[in-house]
Image (spheres, rainbow, N blue to C red):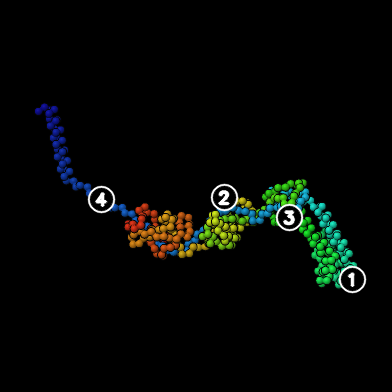
Amino acid sequence: MSGKKRMWLIALIVIILGVVIGIVLSRQKEPMRRRPSKARQKTIKILTVKYGNIKTAVEMTGPLYAYNKVELYAEVSGILQETSKPFKEGCRYKKGEFLVRIDDSVYKNNLLAQKSNLVNQLTLLLPDLGIDFPQSAQKWEVYLKNLKLENPLPELPEPASDKERYYIVSRNIYNLFYTIKSMEATFAKYTLGAPFAGVVTQSLINPGTLVRVGQKLGEFTSTDLYEMEAAVGLFEANRLKIGQPVTLKTEDVRGAFSGKIQRINRVIDRSSMTVKVYIHTRDSRLRDGMYMQAHTEGEPITDAYSVAKDLLVEKSRLYVVEGSILRLRQVEIIGEKGGRVIIRGLADGTRILGEAWSEAKEGKQLPPLKTGKQGK
């Protein structure tokens, strides 16, 4: 046998031997066993209703106004005079300082003339009074001596009898007296004093110009006390009380401000169905017209339970678990707290669906359950 044929024979024997060995080994090897797969079963969270007191904060927003703000109008006419401080926007005044002064020289002279006329009438009255009513003559004489034309007119002496009163009335004394008192009241309107410490926030006049009766002169605003006007729902308004402390914040100024609820309106605004709440605060950093956020703790909500808002069905129903079956039940929504709602209307101890479940529907059989914690 040639060498080439011998090589082919050896190769054939090796191949046949390999095939035989493979068949033998395959018969001896046991087939692989698959581990039994456990079916993944979803567990549903269930909550148990347990009523209690729930504390929730009341959040409010609204504009801030100066509590004391007045518009100034002229009640007399004349030329506006200069004062120690210019009546310009941003100028500050202490209480009682003159804001505006109008030229009063002409009216002052008329007032002095009327006072002089009264002095003349009293001088003529004294001799006759000493004869007819000697017991009262002295007090009228003292009154006349103390009467100064530059000072405000003092009150007339009180007559000792009706007869004396009629006697004085007949001499036109009372008519002159009350005419002068009226003129004094008008004379005081030629100068406007600051009713409180504050700042001029609007100025519409300049010295030297003619001021007319009824003309608006400007606005004067207090920088001491501010009032925030907030609107809340009726439910929140019923949980607030007058004098309750409030924390105020604004994006314009750093830090927090303390305030108190001063007033709560008793009427609901029909356009927004809200109630107005007025909060007072004091701080030199505040400004009229700022927008504020207010935070306070409302009265606790008694006998209530809170659940996640996404558990609600059709805004006012929850899935209740009866045995292992889901049932829809109507609940009373009495408030909201972030992403949670505060409810009543279910019996204490009722089990409810505690998480959103896409397969939930009326009469649905539940898979194995897990008990969840109660709401807060």
The residue under label 1 is 131
Relative side of 168 to 3, left or right: right
The quarter holding residue 52 reads bottom left
For the N terminus, the quadrant is top left
Query: 32 or 139, which is in the foreground?
Result: 139
Name which residue lies at 80% across and 65% down: 155
Please, what is the three-letter code of the amino acid marked with disc 4?
A: Arg
Please, what is the three-letter code of the amino acid marked with disc 2?
A: Glu
- What is the crowding at mark 2: few (fewer than 14 residues within 10 Å), some, or many (at least 20)? few
Q: Position of residue 186 (x, y in %)?
A: 77, 56
Residue 82 visible, this angle: no
Of the residues under marks 2 and 4, which one precedes in the sequence?
4
How many labels sit on residues?
A: 4
Name which residue lies at 32% across and 57% down: 365
Q: Are marks 3 and 2 in contact (CB under 8 Å)?
A: no
- What is the crowding at mark 1: few (fewer than 14 residues within 10 Å), some, or many (at least 20)? few
The residue under label 2 is 251
Of the residues under marks 2 and 1, which one precedes in the sequence?
1
- What is the crowding at mark 3: few (fewer than 14 residues within 10 Å), some, or many (at least 20)? some
Q: Which mark is residue 35?
A: 4
Name which residue lies at 82% across and 57% down: 111
Residue 267 visible, this angle: yes
Query: 48 or 265, which is in the foreground?
Result: 265
The residue under label 3 is 193
**What is the spatial separation of the Cα atoms under label 4 and label 1, in whole angstroms?**
138 Å
Q: Are marks 4 and 1 in contact (CB under 8 Å)?
A: no
Relative side of 227 to 179, left or right: left
Please, what is the three-letter code of the amino acid marked with disc 3?
A: Gly
Q: Which mark is residue 353?
A: none
Q: Nearer the viewer, mark 4 or mark 3?
A: 3
